[in-house]
Amino acid sequence: MDINIFSNSAQFMALVFGLVEFLKKLGLKGNALTIASMALGVVAGVVYQVAKIYPQAGQWISVGAFGLAVGLAASGLYDFANARWPKK
């Protein structure tokens, strides 16, 4: 039974968007950010296709993608709360 939550390309695209936003927060900009976003998109596309071809690998890819998504959400939540929480 496959419970792959990253089952379509739109979810991988959302992950790439999140990773690009994370790179922006780290200070990457201009052509370097454009190149990094292209590279992330290509890698995500290849990984997505590999997951479809090899179901066993797809399970591990799903685990990794889920971990990235949770990490990105956690970093975004920290920034969101830090910007809005009253300073002591």
Image: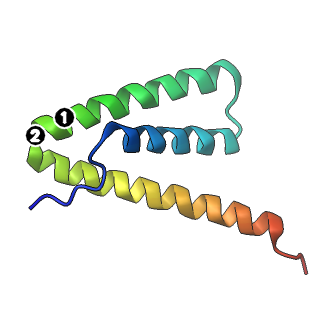
Quarter of the image that includes the N terminus = bottom left
Front in this rendered view, residue 2 or 88? 2
Of the numbered discs in the image, which one, if any, rests on residue 20? none
Question: Callout 2: few (<14), some (14-19), or many (20+) C-alpha neighbours within 10 Å?
Answer: few
Is 25 on the left or on the right of 54, as rendered? right
Quarter of the image that includes the C terminus = bottom right
Task: Name the residue rendered at 35%, 51% in the picture.
Answer: 65
Contact? badges 2 and 1 (CB < 8 Å):
yes
Q: Is residue 32 above or below residue 87?
A: above
Is 7 on the left or on the right of 69, as rendered? left
Task: Name the residue rendered at 49%, 59% in the picture.
Answer: 71
* SS under mark 2: loop
Where residue 67 appears, x then y in whole percent?
A: 39, 59
Is 2 on the left or on the right of 24, as rendered? left
Q: In this view, does 84 lie above or below 50?
A: below
Task: Name the residue rendered at 27%, 52% in the picture.
Answer: 62
* SS under mark 1: helix
Is 39 on the left or on the right of 20, as rendered? left
Where residue 38 appears, x then y in whole percent?
A: 48, 23
Toward the bottom, the furthest residue is 88
Residue annotated with mark 2:
54
Residue annotated with mark 1:
50
Where residue 50 appears, x then y in whole percent?
A: 19, 34
Where residue 37 appears, x then y in whole percent?
A: 53, 28
Front in this rendered view, residue 56 or 8? 8
Question: Callout 1: few (<14), some (14-19), or many (20+) C-alpha neighbours within 10 Å?
Answer: some
The three-letter code of the residue at mark 1 reads Val
The three-letter code of the residue at mark 2 reads Tyr
Q: In which quarter of the image is residue 43?
A: top left
Whole-number angstrom distance, CA of label 2 to CA of label 1 = 6 Å
